[in-house]
Image (cartoon, rainbow, N blue to C red):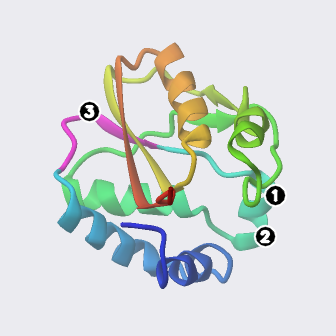
């Protein structure tokens, strides 16, 4: 789904205002839009602990759990944060890459085929950094599943 109006308001309500039930709606939209990935498990981009504490939940994890239920695919806690990072919002692509470089570490061995779930794909910096950690822990193929994606206008 393109990250155009009204998607930013939906994601904001889901992430910032704690409307957790929106994860189910997001998962329904995803499962109606894309085919179930041929993977052994779903991993999720781990949230910043401070933001998770403030929000009371983590959108990517909740989306992964809803997708796992819908697809009958296990959700695996394969990643953790190596270090905190600043918010990505408002950063240019190169700054985003630097911001998340080394931010993730594997917490368990990854299956060879895994799908990495995040809420919004903007520049790919976050999922690239997380996918690198999954590959270092055994993943040979990492598919990325997100609720929304920013479309760059030329």
**Residues at badges 1 and 3 in contact (C-beta under 8 Å)?**
no
Query: What is the chief secondary structure element of the magenta stretch?
Result: loop
Q: Residue at x 62, y 72 (%)?
A: 15
Determine if the magenta segment contains residue 82: no
**Where is 138 relative to 2, above or below?**
above
Q: Gap in Å between the C-alphas at discs 1 and 3?
A: 30 Å
Tell me the quarter of the picture where residue 1 sits.
Answer: bottom left
Tell me the quarter of the picture where residue 50 sits.
Answer: bottom right
**Where is 72 relative to 111, above or below?**
below
User: Who is closer to the viewer here, 154 or 112?
Assistant: 154
Q: Return the residue at label 1.
A: 50
Helix, strand or loop at label 2? It is helix
**Residues at badges 3 and 2 in contact (C-beta under 8 Å)?**
no
* x and y, in percent, of residue 148 in the image: 43, 63
Q: Return the residue at label 2.
A: 54
**Where is 125 relative to 48, above or below?**
above
Image-based side of 34 in relation to 100, left or right:
left
**Residues at badges 2 and 1 in contact (C-beta under 8 Å)?**
yes
Q: Return the residue at label 3.
A: 40
Image-based side of 96 in relation to 108, left or right:
right
Helix, strand or loop at label 3? It is loop
Residue range in magenta is: 36-43
């Amino acid at each position: 789904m393109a990250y155009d109006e009204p998607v930013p308001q939906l994601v904001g309500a889901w992430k910032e205002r704690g409307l957790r039930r929106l994860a189910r709606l997001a998962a329904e939209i995803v499962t109606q839009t894309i085919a179930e990935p041929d993977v052994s498990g779903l991993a999720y981009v781990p949230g910043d602990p401070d933001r998770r504490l403030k929000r009371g939940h983590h959108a990517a994890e909740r989306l992964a759990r809803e997708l796992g239920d819908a697809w009958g695919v296990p959700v695996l806690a394969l990643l953790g944060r190596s270090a905190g990072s600043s918010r990505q919002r408002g950063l240019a692509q190169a700054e985003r890459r630097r911001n998340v470089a080394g931010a993730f570490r594997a917490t368990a061995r990854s299956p060879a085929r895994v799908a990495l779930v995040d809420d919004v794909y903007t520049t790919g910096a976050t999922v690239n950094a997380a996918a690198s950690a999954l590959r270092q822990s055994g993943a040979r193929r990492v598919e990325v599943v997100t609720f929304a994606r920013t479309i760059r206008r030329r």
